Image (cartoon, rainbow, N blue to C red):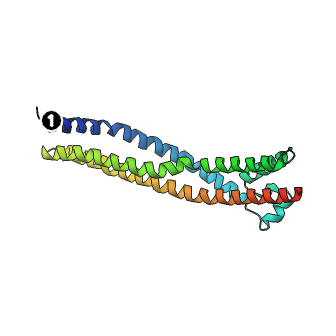
Amino acid sequence: MDIMALLASFIYLVSSSLLLPILLLLCLLTVWLVVYSGQFFALWLARKRHATPVHAMDALRARKFEAFPAPVRRFGQAFLQVRQEAMADIAVQNLLRDTESRLWQSLDRLKLLIRIGPGLGLVGTLIPMGTGLAALSQGDLTRLSGDLVIAFTTTVVGMTLGMLSYFYFSVQRRWVEEDVQHMELLCELGMREER
């Protein structure tokens, strides 16, 4: 038996067997993104309700955390407790780093989906194109049209996942940067009062 034909058959079998997992992953990621969209808009409404005060420095100095979004409010309460500890400057710095790290980690799934969505869409396009071309060589136009429908819909779904994830990531990255800025300002104001 020809080794090239054997290798080509093996690769074709591997490629064809990947189509079902790719379609399943695209479906699961679509459901996850729909759920995440609801969470995003709830977060957006909450942030609209708690718009950053015009005089953020004065509000932070007066410890009026209720005027800020939830991450800053939680950090403010934790800051007031940590500031009472023996080595407050180190404890506050550690609290700030931990909080900042958690905020950035909350965006990791979106960052991953920005890359994975279009990649899965592309792989989901190429696999049925291969089987569709094989069907075309045998004159089976029905199979070709079915494979082309799968190919193009996986592309659309994958690209949509990537675009929506990028939109959500961009907006939330701006929110995280704003929250971290307010947390750092609170730490500087609070620790300056201690001196």
- Mark 1 burial class by Cα count in 10 Å: few <14, some 14-19, many 20+: few
Q: Is 110 located above or below residue 182 in the figure?
A: above
Name of the residue lying farthest toward the top: 1
Residue 175, percent from left and from top: 65, 58
Q: Residue at x 25, y 48 (%)?
A: 129
Q: Is residue 30 visible?
A: yes
Residue 135 at x, y percent in the picture: 17, 43
In this orientation, which residue lies closer to the viewer: 149 or 62? Answer: 62
Q: Is residue 160 left or right of residue 140?
A: right
Residue 161 visible in this rendered orientation of the protein? no
Q: Against 84, is 2 above or below? A: above
Side of 128 where 87 appears, left or right: right
Image quadrant in which the C terminus is located: bottom right
Q: Amino acid at mark 1?
A: Ile
Q: Which residue appears at 61% of the width and 53% of the height?
A: 41
In the figure, is residue 13 to the left or right of 38? left
Camera-side residue of 102 and 170: 102
Which residue in the rendered view is the most extreme toward the bottom? 54
- Number of numbered markers: 1
Q: Which residue is mark 1?
A: 3
- The residue positioned 50% from the left and 55% from the top of the image is 164
Specify the quadrant that holds the N terminus: top left
x and y percent of residue 136 in the render? 16, 47
Q: Residue at x 37, y 37 (%)?
A: 21
| Residue 148 percent across, percent down from the top left | 27, 49
Label 1, secondary structure: give it: helix
Q: Residue furthest left?
A: 1
Between 141 and 93, the residue placed more toward the observer is: 93
**19 left or right of 98?**
left
Relative vertical location of residue 94 with respect to residue 53 in this rendering, above or below = above
